[in-house]
Image (cartoon, grey):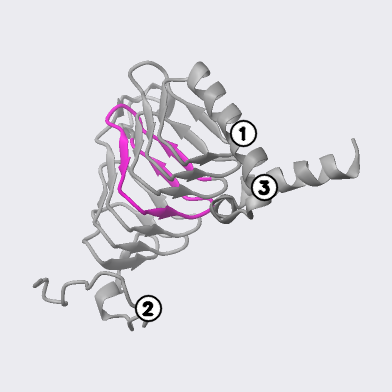
Amino acid sequence: MDLQAQRRQQHKLRLSWMPWLYFVLKPRHHEWAHAWQREVQDLLRELETVEIAEGCFIAPEARIFAEPGRTVRIGPGCSIAADVFVHGPVELGPHVSLNARVSLDGGVAGIRIGEGTRIASGATLYAFDHGLAPDRPVRGQPVTSKGIVIGQDVWVGANAGITDGVTVGDHAVVGMGAVVTRDVPPWAIVGGAPARLLGDRRQRPRSGITGGWDPPDTEGNP
């Protein structure tokens, strides 16, 4: 393999592990990168029960499994990085990002993630649970599934865990390494194991960037 080809392979690997770079590629890289992604995504559609909208990036090193009845739906502009594991049913809204080594298992009830949400490296979301009855081994326990719902514009930090039955409200932040076992209100900042309320995003200093939305005040008024 010549040096130019090696550089192209290295660039693909870089994109797989840092997929946000795909959306800011220099014009000279667009043709080969888009053709590469068409090939990756078309093969995935052939092999699994997946729906992939326009403008997505999916690392070939990601592992997406979607049997009939366990569809994975990937909205426009999503990115899925290397070593991500996704087992349907899972639905990703527009512009959701799954960073490296994220694990999502939809169980039976499924996982839904809202628009613009960021799931950081190593986070785990499992939409099923085992029974704990003492009269039988763990392997023989019944499995239940309530589902997980993550709202819009949520940031789930690295290595956080979210358990079955949890809803995380719009604009919330889940801190690095948190273990979320209960619902998280909109705009809340939570952390710890088990996760507890640490603050409210609406009380953080403004970014100073114009053109964004105006959040409601801390009393929830428009």
Q: Position of residue 165 (x, y in %)?
A: 25, 42
Residue 132 relative to residue 52: left or right: left
- Label 2, residues with CA under 10 Å away: few <14, some 14-19, many ≥20: few
Residue, disc 1: 35
In-front residue for pair 61/133: 61
Residue, disc 3: 29
Residue 78 relative to residue 216: left or right: right
Name the secondary structure under disc 3. Answer: helix
Distance from label 2 to label 1 (Cα)? 35 Å
Residue, disc 2: 209
Q: The magenta stretch spans which residues? A: 102-127
Distance from label 3 to label 2 (Cα)? 30 Å
Q: On the rendered image, what quadrant is the N terminus found in?
A: top right
Q: Position of residue 116 (x, y in %)?
A: 36, 54
Distance from label 1 to label 3 (Cα)? 10 Å
Which is more N-terminal, label 2 or label 3?
A: 3
Name the secondary structure under disc 1. Answer: helix
